[in-house]
Image: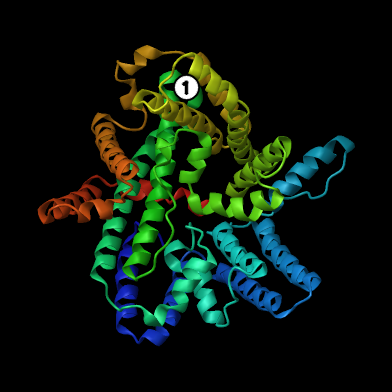
Amino acid sequence: MLFNSIDFLIFFPVVTLIYFIIPRKVRYIWLLVASYYFYMCWNAKYAFLLLTSTVVTWLCGRLIYAVEKPAMRKFFLAACLCVNLGILFFFKYFDFFMANCNRVLSSLHMQLWDRSFDVLLPVGISFYTFQALGYTMDVYRGKVEPERNILRYALFVSFFPQLVAGPIERSESLLGQMRDLEKKKLWNYENVAGGLTLMVWGLFVKMVIADRAALLVDTVFENYYLHGTVALATAAVGFSIQIYCDFMGYSTIAIGAARVMGFKLMENFETPYFARSVGEFWKRWHISLSTWFRDYLYIPLGGSRCSKPRKYFNTMVTMAVSGLWHGANWNYVVWGLLHGAYQVIGDMTAGLRAKLYDALHTKKESFSFHLAQAVCTFVLVDAAWIFFRAPSVAHALRFCKRLATKWDPWNLFNGTVYTLGLDRPEFNILIVSLAVLFLVDLIRYRKKQEITGFLKEQCVWFRWGVIIALIAATLVFGVYGISFESSQFIYFQF
């Protein structure tokens, strides 16, 4: 069930209305039933995997808390990790692993597996697996007490707004809110109004910007060998816009839907393209995942409190695993390694760059310097996105080679950009929509306010004018139709 579908437009109000009406003691049960129905709309049989992950992590959490011997605690934690990561590996990485083993063994005329394991990847499996494992590791570390009520814990793992594409919530936050569910007020106007506003904004950036940019990106990437530098650069920038608006749009809708019901989910994006370094970019992009890897992988490896070589090794391993988390393909690994290399090189050259800035009398607090940093960071991030979007590393390398060698600057002025999947009116709609996005992100960056906080400070006529305009723009300019039914949220596949 997509957020931008008629089904969800019916599902969400019905679930929310009943949630507000029923007795407080059974509200979590109702949300649990609604969440499983939401997930089963994708593929009913895969709800068993969600249930398995829930039961295993709940039981292991209870056992870890109950035993006192460190060896037994480690055993139950290891068992939990093996079961959940084993399921994830089987469904997401088995074919990738066997194909690479066969490629290595082919030189010896050997083969481990002679056919592919053709199975549909369970939607959101990486998200709910990491959320459940985070709970188990928090119990092991003593950060939270295990949840006694398995139904309440099952709701924590399966909460429908963030089930299939995050944010990946921490147990101390979301589970704590669910434990206090009976104490929550049935109705809070600010939560409802603010949540619905976030949902409207999320639908706007998804349907008007992301899905429109996808038409241009798909057209060029699928036929990159027919285009030159201008078209390829436009598509690369277009994909950076598409994936940001697609994923940020989903997260915004999820946060808004949860807020309507009185839950506060963590922010997942904080103007990432205003970042002035790649390290800062990762503090602003997919925050729930980057902090998960920081807390449960990077720091256990040693983090930054170690020698420089070890720190760089930890960074590269973390970013490589982050890339692999996104998909069973080498292009995702290369994407992660590029981001790791950016951070390592940035740290290694920090002293040299500081001396260079001093020698050139650079005003490091000036707007121009900050702008140059943001532009350079965006170029680096955008170059890495090519590997993320391309179907293979070889495809990405050929794309980059053509981008660098097939110069055609005249195509900036002869109307060629209006033949890349979007005609002139559609392209102009995209540009205007991006101007709106830039303005909202600029307010967020400068004032540290999300759109709801900013609108709350404005006059009533302005506030309602903006909301009505967003709704109208989504209805009129949103991408609809049979040919666009495949425009799901990109991160559903992960």
Q: Is mark 1 on a helix, strand or loop?
A: helix
Residue in the picture at 50% in, 72% down: 175
Residue 424, position as x, y percentages in the image: 25, 29
**Observer able to see residue 282:** yes
Seen in the picture, residue 16 relative to 305 is either above or below; the reply is below
The answer to which of 465 and 401 lies nearer the viewer is 465
Q: Which of 295 and 157 is in front in this view?
A: 295
Residue projecting furthest to the right: 108
The count of marks equals 1
Position of residue 281 relative to residue 68, above or below, is above
- Determine the image quadrant of residue 250: bottom left
Quadrant location of residue 215?
top left
Extreme residue in the left direction: 461
Which percent across, then down, holds residue 7?
Answer: 34, 65
Query: What residue sits 51% from the left and 78% below the top?
Result: 152
User: Mark 1 Cα within 10 Å, few/some/many (few <14, many 20+)?
Assistant: few
Any part of residue 3 in sight: no
Q: In this view, does 118 lie to the left or right of 460?
A: right
Seen in the image, is 398 located left or right of residue 197?
Answer: right
Q: Where is residue 198 in the image (x, y as percent from the top left)?
A: 30, 56
Find residue 365 and report its horizontal and vertical position in percent. Answer: 39, 28
Q: Name the residue under label 1.
A: 226
Give the image quarter of residue 342: top right
Compared to residue 442, the image places residue 471 above or below, namely below
Position above or below: 98 against 313: below
Instruction: Tell me which residue sits at (42%, 64%) in the image.
Output: 161
Decide if residue 307 is on the left or right side of residue 218.
right
Q: What residue type is labelled 1?
A: Leu
- Quarter of the image with the N terminus in it: bottom left
- The one nearer the camera, 272 or 295, is 295
